[in-house]
Structures are given as structure tokens and as C-alpha cells.
Image (cartoon, grey):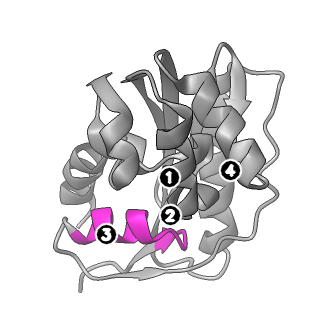
Amino acid sequence: MKRQIVLASQSPRRRELLSKCKVPFLDVKPNSDEIINNDIPLNEAIALLAEEKALSVFERYPQALIIGADTIVVDNKEILGKPKDEEDAFKMLKRLSGKRHLVITGVALISEEERLRFYDETIVEFYELSDDMINEYIRSKEPMDKAGAYGIHGNGGLFVKRIEGDFYSVMGLPIARIYKLLQKHL
């Protein structure tokens, strides 16, 4: 019998990405605090957050393989989370305009036999954005539930001049690496 896979996330983007692996899975809301440990390097702290999410779901599904993930946007060593409101979204997008920033996605795979965590880093460069472009994007409501106030998979992708790294990691899950790992576990 194949092992049950559980995605410790309610993110529609992560569900969409994991479905590319053509394996059945449940998605379950994790129960974790999402507090970043400032005593370790940021990329490792994000991987640790992913592990904490996975572990909170593993308690309820101990026979399953749990996948946890967390994604942040970093500009000049400052984390840009989800915007609090439209004004905050505008400030974030204005800040990212015409510049490069870092997206870190931490991932954890937890099972009875193994605990694996890692992170993926991608550099994203934006074109210069006019205030009108930013305001139009904010009116769409797309940026309001996304780290850094943009979704690369949606209309936020129109701002992206180039990326260095994994496009899918910026969406929230480095799916090619996940796929390879799932092949080992199933």
C-alpha cells in the first residue's frame, strides 16, 4: 500500500503545484506559530518554520508523509511578509520596483522514518513600476495574501524582469525537487 501524502498547507498555489506530481494527497491546515528564529541564518530559519508546520500535522497523521513549506520575500535583509492593507502593499511593491530581491522557500518532509528539511533561494528582479501599475495591481486584490505583495504566477508576473533560480519555489514549492524526493518515498 502506498503511503498517504499530506500537504501541511492551505495555500491554493501549493496544492496546484503538488498536484503536478500526479499523486493523491490531503491538504491540512498546520497549527504552528510561524515565529522566525533569529539565532540561526534566515534560510535555515525558514526551513525550520516549514518543519514546524509539517510536525504540527504529523501529530494528526503519524503514518503519512507530511510536506511542509514556508516562503518569504527578503529585500535588503528585511522580510516582507503579507501586506497588512493596501497602503502596505503599495509600499512593498514600490520598494521592490526596479530592484532585485530574494525569495526563500523552506521545505520539510516528515515521516516515521525520516525528517528532511531544506531551503531554496531564488533571486527575482522587477522592472521599474509606475504608481499607476502598482495601484491597478492592488485593486485586483491579488497581492493581499502574498509575501512581498505579489504573486509571480498571476498578474504580479508582469513585473518580473528576470529570475535566477526556481520559478516554482517563488510560487511556494520547489516542485521538481519535491517530485524527486517523492519518488524515493513512494
Q: Which residue is mark 2?
A: 140
Range of magenta residues = 7-19
Q: Nearer the viewer, mark 1 or mark 3?
A: 1
Q: Which residue is mark 1?
A: 136
Count neighbours of disc 4 (C-alpha within 10 A) and say few if under 14, some if 14 to 19, many if 20 or more.
Answer: some
The alpha-carbon separation of the residues under discs 1 and 3 comes to 26 Å
Q: Is residue 106 left or right of residue 31?
A: left
Query: Which of marks 2 and 3 precedes in the sequence?
Result: 3
* Magenta-colored stretch includes residue 8: yes
Query: Which of marks 2 and 4 precedes in the sequence?
Result: 4
Q: Nearer the viewer, mark 1 or mark 4?
A: 1
Count neighbours of disc 1 (C-alpha within 10 A) and say few if under 14, some if 14 to 19, many if 20 or more.
Answer: few
Q: Nearer the viewer, mark 2 or mark 1?
A: 1
Total marks in image: 4
Give the SS element for disc 4.
Answer: loop
Q: Which mark is residue 169?
A: none
Q: Which residue is mark 3?
A: 16
The alpha-carbon separation of the residues under discs 3 and 4 comes to 20 Å
* Front position in the image: 100 or 14: 100
- Asked if the residue at tag 1 contacts the one at tag 2, i.e. Cβ–Cβ closer than 8 Å, the answer is yes
**Quadrant including the C terminus:** bottom left
Give the SS element for disc 1.
Answer: helix
Which picture quadrant has residue 85?
bottom right
Q: Nearer the viewer, mark 3 or mark 4?
A: 4
The alpha-carbon separation of the residues under discs 1 and 4 comes to 18 Å
Q: Which residue is mark 4?
A: 82
Q: Is residue 118 left or right of residue 177?
A: right
- Magenta-colored segment: predominant secondary structure: helix
Tell me the kind of residue under disc 3: Glu
